[in-house]
Image (cartoon, grey):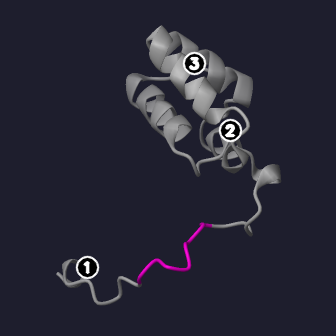
Amino acid sequence: MVLDGIAIDRIIEMAWEDRTTFEAINFQFGLKEQEVIDLMRREMKPKSFKMWRERVQGRKTKHEKLRTFEKGRFKCSRQKSISNNSIAKR
């Protein structure tokens, strides 16, 4: 599979996000976890890659099977509703 620069940037962004699973990246781009790791190693500076790997290893939110919350979007119980947001009503 050949990925353009925009797709590579999006994969890197998704890989850095704590709550975006490797399964979500696989679903959207067809890349397995090891392929994402290889892409990150290839596209990032060595120190940035090392920092990312330390952050991701063992993180439960990066794997659907290890998550403790229900499937779907995680929402904190303290998160306020934005239904009265004036920007959304424009």
Q: For this view, does 37 lie left or right of residue 77?
A: right
Q: Which residues are magenta?
A: 73-80
Sooner in the amino-acid sequence: mark 2 or mark 3:
2
- The secondary structure that most of the magenta stretch takes on is loop
Q: Secondary structure at mark 3?
A: helix
Instruction: Report which residue position mark 2 lands on.
Output: 26
Q: Which of the 4 image quarters holds residue 85?
A: bottom left
Tell me the tag on residue 88: 1
Query: How dense is the environment of label 1, judged by Cα within 10 Å: few (below 14), some, or many (20 and up)?
Result: few
Specify whether residue 2 is in view. Answer: no
Residue 15 pos. (x, y %) = 55, 36
Give amino acid for label 3: Leu
Q: For this view, does 3 lie left or right of residue 74?
A: left
In this rendering, the answer to whether 18 lies above or below 49 is below
Q: CA distance from mark 2 to mark 3?
A: 13 Å
Give amino acid for label 1: Ala
In this rendering, the answer to whether 20 lies above or below 6 is below
Instruction: Report which residue position mark 3 lands on.
Output: 39
Viewer-nearest residue: 21 or 53: 53
Q: Secondary structure at mark 2?
A: helix
Q: For this view, does 88 lie left or right of residue 53?
A: left
> Residue at image x 25%, y 79%?
88
Query: How dense is the environment of label 3, judged by Cα within 10 Å: few (below 14), some, or many (20 and up)?
Result: some
